[in-house]
Image: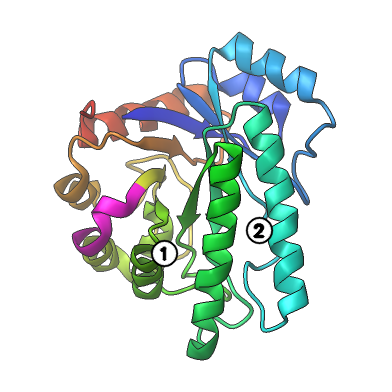
Amino acid sequence: MEIGLTVGGSIERLAATAEGFEFVELSVGESAYGPGDADDELRDALDASDAELCVHLPFDQVLATPVAQLNDAIVDYLAELLEWAGGVGARKAVLHATMRNPHDTDQRPTFADQLSAVAAAGDDAGVEVVVENVGHQARGLPLSVLGDIAEETGTAVCFDVGHAYMEGGDDAIDRFLGEHASRVSHLHVHDVRGRGDTHLPLGAGEVDYGIVAEHLSGFDGTAAVEVFTDDVPLLEDSARRVRDHLGNGA
């Protein structure tokens, strides 16, 4: 298992916090880091931190709508970002599982087609696309639906532990991983309180990471600490706790 750190769209945060982590996950595109804006600075920060790169694709727009022209434009936009990401050496790209109306069952095949198209663009660019569960959000697909579509399309999953807890508690974590652990290539790890506090350091909330360990012990993918602080000791402590739970990988 490789442990990294989400840094939003900020090269400054990357430079200040990434040392000692094996990779960073940089948010790109709309409302985040603009590809080409400061690529030399990005490369310098990665080299100084001795960290590899993953990216988080934009989430301002949904992945699937009922309008074919919009869907085509979304895929084209994400494909451009993936081509850039591959060019700067990114390994993985996280994509939110969202659609205009996630409860419209008739539109779920459209979502599957969109997901397949973006994943294929990632393959062309040499970047693994991993689809992230955001079922606690208004436009996020429910965990069970996302799991089925990921299996159907053969798409890797970014399993966000805290998001799953927000959607259905520890039971939701257990159900999803019990059925779809083999699809999980990437993790977002943070802690959550049921009252709505999220992206807390591990141990500060209510998530039972023992359940995650039952299904992903020896996990050999990537795990990004997604804790919203620049306090390096807190970030390092969360990374240590993840490693203690999941082991060193295969």
Q: Which residue lies furthest to the right in this view?
A: 37
Start-end of magenta stretch? 177-184
Total residue callouts: 2
**Among the 4 quarters of the image, the one containing residue 193:** bottom left
Q: In this view, does 114 lie above or below 11?
A: below
**Residue type, mark 1 in image:** Thr
**Label 2 crowd (10 A; few <14 / some 14-19 / many >=20):** some
Residue 146: give x, y in percent of width and height: 41, 69
Q: Which residue lies furthest to the front in this view?
A: 124
Residue at image point 18% right, 47% down: 210
Secondary structure state at the residue bearing disc 1: helix
Magenta stretch, main secondary structure class: helix
**First in sequence: mark 2 or mark 1?**
2
Q: Which residue lies furthest to the left in this view?
A: 214
Q: Measure the C-alpha gap from mark 2 to mark 1.
A: 21 Å
Residue 196 or 156: which is nearer the viewer? Answer: 156
Q: Is residue 159 left or right of residue 15?
A: left
Q: Quadrant of the C terminus?
A: top left
Residue at image point 41% right, 64% down: 153
Q: Quadrant of the N terminus?
A: top left
Q: Does the magenta stretch include residue 26?
A: no
- Which numbered disc covers residue 58? none
Residue at image point 18% right, 50% down: 215
Residue 96 or 191: which is nearer the viewer? Answer: 96
Q: Which residue, given by chain and number where applicable, does mark 1 sit on?
A: 153
Q: Which residue, given by chain and number where applicable, does mark 2 sit on?
A: 59
**Residue type, mark 2 in image:** Phe
